[in-house]
Amino acid sequence: MAIVSERGKMHNPVTDSGGVFLGRIKEIGPRHPKRDKVNVGDKVVSLTSLSFTPLKIESIESIDLQRDRVNVKGYAILFARSPFAVVPPDLPESVVMAVLDVAGAAPQAARYTKLGDYVVVLGANGKSGLLVMHEAKKRVGPTGKVIAVVRREEAAKFVRESGLADEVVIADAKDAIDLYQKIYNVTNGRLADLTINCVNTPDTEMGSILVTRDGGKVYFFSMATSFQRAALQAEGVAKNVELIIGNGYYPDHDIITLEILNENKFLRDYFLKKYS
Ligand SMILES: NC(=O)c1ccc[n+]([C@@H]2O[C@H](COP(=O)([O-])OP(=O)(O)OC[C@H]3O[C@@H](n4cnc5c(N)ncnc54)[C@H](OP(=O)(O)O)[C@@H]3O)[C@@H](O)[C@H]2O)c1
């Protein structure tokens, strides 16, 4: 409440991001480009961060720790260029919200993964990590590999059961040397062609850089990333890797990401169980 009333936006001091909102359309501007496609009363999810969206909270009704959700009375303003999605009728709204919170991740993984690639996913058992692995797995083909990195044995078991990864490595992404050695071993020294960082904690830039081969790419979806630190660290260890800032937008990212729940029964069941 304090942050939003002071700044008019939600700036999460821990993640430096804001999440998304779900609500009903109260009013549509006369020149809004989607004026003919949506109606007052439609239920929508914002696809732009709340750290970026004018927001007024009148009261907090409840906090749902299980689903990372705060139920509030209030309103927000979406501009003509602010992306949003109408909630589809066949999925619970909380599931749609959870999935679309990270809607940019999977389409960007699809964009950067090539046939035969070794793709390392850090934070593989989280929301974005799972969706990313689905898209990467579809594209690496029989000669490539999706390598999941998780930090707990229980998470490793869950990812193995998902069938989304060819290899599961247990490592703390903050421990760059240990992570490097484990990825070196599992790839026979080849390292990753593409590393996708989906963790929600800081200090994982160096690990992401070290596990990526020279000439490879690191996609930092995590907003806990210090992009300044990533740039300086790549230079510091003389790594010629492309460092990509995780743009959360991709055309039709909502449609692409929700389609994953139709394509993958494991993920559909998981998201339904965890978030509905
Ligand atoms: N670029 C964008 O537009 C955009 C949009 C939305 C979100 N994000 C960012 O994306 C990130 C991930 O979001 P999410 O919703 O997918 O998060 P999530 O569901 O909470 O998953 C985060 C995962 O990271 C793992 N993790 C954390 N620290 C780790 C470490 N040191 N080593 C290994 N694994 C670690 C966690 O493992 P445990 O299960 O063991 O805790 C968890 O599985 C966040 O930083 C968020 O800010 C970016």
Image (cartoon, grey):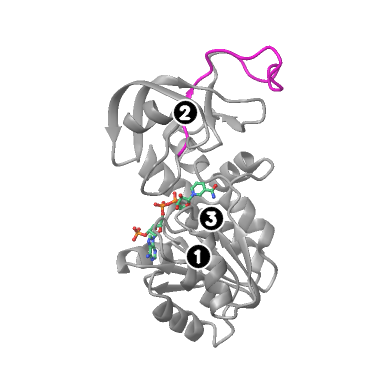
- Determine whether 107 is above or below 119 in the image: above
Cβ–Cβ under 8 Å for marks 1 and 3: no
Check disc 2 and give the amino acid type. Answer: Leu
Residue indicated by mark 2: 22
Check disc 1 and give the amino acid type. Answer: Arg
**As rendered, which of 201 and 93 lies closer to the eye?**
201
Disc 2: CA contacts within 10 A as few (<14), some (14-19) or many (>=20): many
Residue indicated by mark 1: 229
In the image, the residue with mark 3 has its CB under 8 Å from the nearest atom of ligand 1: yes
Residue pictured at 43% horizontal, 30% vertical? 7
Q: Which percent across, then down, holds residue 51? A: 48, 37
> Which quadrant of the figure shows ligand 1?
bottom left
Disc 1: CA contacts within 10 A as few (<14), some (14-19) or many (>=20): some
Among the two numbered marks 1 and 3 on one chain, the one whose residue lies closer to the N terminus: 3
Q: Which residues are magenta?
A: 19-39
Mark 2–mark 3 distance (CA, rounded to whole Å): 22 Å
Quarter of the image with the N terminus is top left
Residue indicated by mark 3: 221
- Determine whether 90 is above or below 165 in the image: above
Please name the predominant secondary structure of the magenta segment in the image. Answer: loop
Residue pictured at 37% horizontal, 26% vertical? 5
Mark 1–mark 2 distance (CA, rounded to whole Å): 34 Å
Q: Which percent across, then down, holds residue 4? A: 39, 29
Residue 21 lies in the magenta-colored region: yes
